[in-house]
Image (cartoon, rainbow, N blue to C red):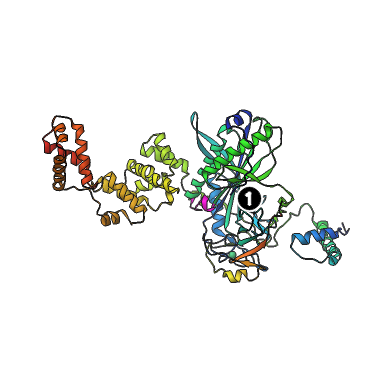
Amino acid sequence: MSTAITEPVVPYDEVIAEFDPVLGLEVHVELGTATKMFCGCPTEFGAEPNTQTCPTCLGLPGSLPVVNAIGVESAIRIGLALNCSIAEWCRFARKNYFYPDMPKNFQTSQYDEPICFNGYLDVEVETDDGMRTFRVEIERAHMEEDTGKTSHQGGATGRIHGADYSLVDYNRAGIPLIEIVTKPITGTGKYAPEVAKAYVTALREILRGLGVSDVKMEQGSLRCDANVSLRPSPESPLGTRTETKNVNSLRSVERSVRYEMTRQAAILRAGNKVMQETRHWHEDTGVTTSGRPKSDADDYRYFPEPDLVPIAPSREWVEQLRAALPENPSVLRARVQAAWGISDFEMMAVVKAGALELVAATVAAGADQAAARKWWVGEVTRIANERGVELVDLPITPVDIARVEAMVGAGALNDKLARQVIEAVLAGEGSPDDVVATRGLAVVSDDGPLLEAIDAALAEAPDVAEKILSGKLAAAGAIVGAVMKATRGQADAARVRELLLERLGVAE
Amino acid sequence: MSDTPSITRADVAHLASLARIDLPPESLDHYAEQLAVILGAVAQVAEVAADDIPPMSHPLPLVNVFRTDEVRPSLTSDEALSGAPSVESDRFRVPRILDEA
Ligand SMILES: [Zn+2]
């Protein structure tokens, strides 16, 4: 439940006419390592509370952290994929604060020596003048650890305010995080919300391609904080920013930036000052509410972590990792589009559906690119939308789709039956071959039963037969429809039409 | 340089509350005196540290001490919670986090 405070806002086009927005995005990625960043505890999502802890991640006296090699490797690979420089030498630092989500009373992070710095990511946004590329500059990407999970008890809303006490599960405490911070993003004008969304989308695509995280925003393995400020013009100094948390879907990245722009504009227009504070995004109501203002508590008294030795990635190691990077998604897109020979518009449809890798894998599994696109962008996307999940999270694989398409190509299934097979696979009835066997789905290819069904349909509708005989071939559709119905969709409609005309002795 | 840094009762009380240490008021002066002596001793380092000596954060000349990403057994939740002052539903129960505004 959200607080019922509604703040004044300014219509978006007026915001754009009067102000220049500046963004800053901080993305936290939970790595998909088997163990935590500084201890050997497992990282599985959804385990029973406090069953994935040890003296190190509980901060018990006498325990010592040791760095997870894959955590460092993943950080470097992410940095390289974001065109960053990789530090020759850097350290961890303690970020001291008193809050029970970290049992150590500090978070092991990096401060002024991030492992990756000075990168960029080009993102594409649809503008009034077609696709336009915006370069988002990356300030840094650094290693740190996740916090435990607190749930607030008592009070009316389960939120921290008004809670009587809190319960803490430390399973998540210590899971490796990479925090990726942009430089101030300027020059986006009215496209600021779209650029924010495109950045997080592109970043997620890169991270997924690297295989370093499952990047599920709804499960919190990818989290975005959006900093927004407004200034009168691009020449003015930066305005006061707010930092919106709890933005956990791509759609809310865009919506929360847009909302915050309209809210800040109302404050500035009234001659007031925007307060520098943390704000919380409410998906249900589409507004942000005040969190807490910056305070003395934000003095984290960082100092170098004395329990860990510095990290000094050798240049050989870095170059090895660089050479083994997967193809950058935007380069991949251009290459694939050329190979398939499809238009920008058709390519956009695939990308927007989040289906590029799936379609490519389906093609690799033997399907024609047009057919692979048709299934993923059409039928399967429709079902994903119905279920409110991402395409990749549906229980159907590119190999399944390629198999269905192969059966269509061989004439064993028609489109209608193929859709039934896909639905059945998604309903957990097994592979396409299992479904076809169990449900007895197959195009009736034997002419005998088809001719019987045609004769029956003609007998039912002698008037239609007359029409066809008199040359009104369009009327054949009614008979074909009746035959399709009689064979429960398992006939090849084109073959039925052919047989029907033959039967009546009418030429096409 | 050899001046003993001054630590007040209020400083000690503040540090104690940050560190969640329950210090009786009558011991504050005692600790203030001791902390001042400790800080004074540490401050002597500044007398020998010249500009050509880089600050260090670790006594060992080591880098890249890594662990392979292999799971080791964790504690059971009973073990993990055994030192908790208060437990509920297999979780650490902690007092209200923010003072009510
Ligand atoms: Zn642990």
> Ligand 1 lies in which image quarter?
bottom right
Query: Quadrant where the C terminus of chain A lies?
Result: top left
User: In the rendered structure, does residue A216 fall within the stretch colored magenta?
Assistant: yes
Name the image quarter holding residue A435.
bottom left
Residue A106's x, y, as percent?
Answer: 67, 58
Q: Is residue A316 visible?
A: no
Residue at position x 28%, y 45% in the image? A416
Give the overall secondary structure of the magenta segment.
loop
A122 vs A150, nearest the viewer: A150
Residue at position x 61%, y 55% in the image? A158
**For the magenta stretch, what is the residue range?**
A210-221
Residue A227's x, y, as percent?
Answer: 62, 42
Residue B83's x, y, as percent?
Answer: 65, 70
* Above/below status of A310 relative to A196: below
Q: Image check: B23 left or right of A40? A: right
A86 vs A441, nearest the viewer: A441
* Above/below status of A231 relative to A383: above
Residue that extends furthest to the right in the rendered view of this protein: B3
Name the image quarter holding residue A374.
top left
Q: Image check: A475 left or right of A278? A: left
Q: Chain of mark 1?
A: A
User: In the rendered structure, does residue A36 fall within the stretch colored magenta?
Assistant: no
Q: Image check: A448 left or right of B41? A: left
Residue A69's x, y, as percent?
Answer: 56, 59
Task: Give the residue type that dot 1 points to.
Answer: Pro
Please tell me whether mark 1 sits on a helix, a strand or a loop.
loop
Q: How many marks?
A: 1
A115 vs A261, nearest the viewer: A261
Q: Is residue A205 visible?
A: yes
Mark 1 closeness class: few <14, some 14–19, many ≥20 residues within 10 Å: many
| Residue receiving disc 1 | A114
